[in-house]
Amino acid sequence: MQLYYTPRSHFSRKVRILLDAWHMPVELIDVGDVSDSAAFGSNPLMKVPTLVDGETWLIDSDHIARYLVRTYQPQDDFSVLDESESTLNIRAVLNGIMAAEVEWLLARRTGIPTEQYRRFDKILHSMRQGMAWLEQNAARFLTQPSYSGFHLVCLWDHLACYQTLELTPYSNLAELCRLLSQNDFVNKSVPPAIPKER
Ligand SMILES: N[C@@H](CCC(=O)N[C@@H](CS)C(=O)NCC(=O)O)C(=O)O
């Protein structure tokens, strides 16, 4: 099994945490800078993650997670297949903030002065509103390790790594992430710190 990824990709980490939790071997293939037209494991959208499992080729982190559960972990110990209204909304907000952050970061990485465009003000505003909504709804996360909790940790650690948002207003989410990060399989894929510019 191969996973095209980057070490800091929060979408890829959702899959990596599951694979590590289940002790499933995987060959990780780092595609490099995602703002370039790198090899993305044949993903026409030029995004990671992409999973290749024998003849099976799959894109989109949530689709990959569902495939892994259905194929290898039908007991679904982390509620990947949960489609309750509450979980779907949590997932949509988490994915929405993550996607907004990618847009903002890649715009800046490729030389767009984001502070000059109202579009990026809205992107940042949607991220802050999404975080506030998650904070208010933190009780909806299961207390035991779950895919939604892993998803939150992926978002949280990525925001912290890139210092995209001030995280101090979100103490309920911080506590959830602190608890989940006590698991080795969660900790193993923490995004590497960004080297300081000299
Ligand atoms: N919906 C996709 C989103 C994947 C995604 O946006 N990945 C980012 C890296 S974390 C990426 O490769 N972005 C490249 C780009 O947008 O050009 C998923 O869940 O896998």
Image: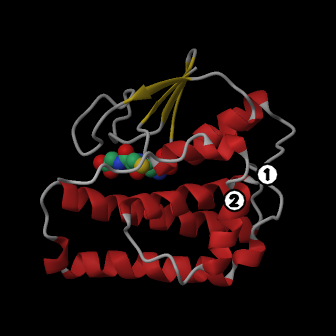
Kindly indicate the quadrant of the structure image that contains residue 120. bottom left
- Tell me the element at label 2: helix
Count how many numbered circles sit on residues in the image. 2
Q: What residue did someone put label 2 on?
A: 149
Q: What residue is drawn where x is 58% and y is 15%?
A: 54
Q: What residue is drawn where x is 55% and y is 65%?
A: 94
Q: Which of 194 and 37 is in front in this view?
A: 194
**Disc 2 or 1, which lies upstream in sequence?**
1
- Label 2 vs label 1, nearer the camera: 2
Residue with the most extreme right position: 75
Q: Marks 2 and 1, Cα distance to the nearest angstrom?
A: 10 Å
Q: Residue 126: x and y, percent? A: 42, 79
Q: Residue 52: x and y, percent? A: 52, 23
Asked whether mark 1 and ligand 1 are closer than 8 Å, the reply comes as no
Q: Nearer the viewer, residue 192 or 147?
A: 192
Whether residue 69 sits left or right of residue 173 in the image: it is right
Q: In this view, does 126 lie above or below 30?
A: below
Kindly indicate the quadrant of the structure image that contains residue 30. top left
Q: Nearer the viewer, residue 163 or 9?
A: 163
- Tell me the element at label 1: loop
Question: What colour scheme was applied to this rendering of the protein?
Answer: secondary structure
**Which amino acid does the dot numbered 2 rest on?**
Gly
Q: Which mark is residue 79?
A: 1
Q: Residue 149: x and y, percent? A: 69, 59
**Which amino acid does the dot numbered 1 rest on?**
Ser
Q: Which of 126 and 169 is in front in this view?
A: 169
Q: How crowded is mark 2: few (under 14 residues within 10 Å), some or many (20 or more)?
A: many
Q: How crowded is mark 1: few (under 14 residues within 10 Å), some or many (20 or more)?
A: some
Q: What residue is drawn where x is 73% and y is 28%?
A: 23
Quadrant (top left/top right/bottom left/bottom right) for the N terminus? top right
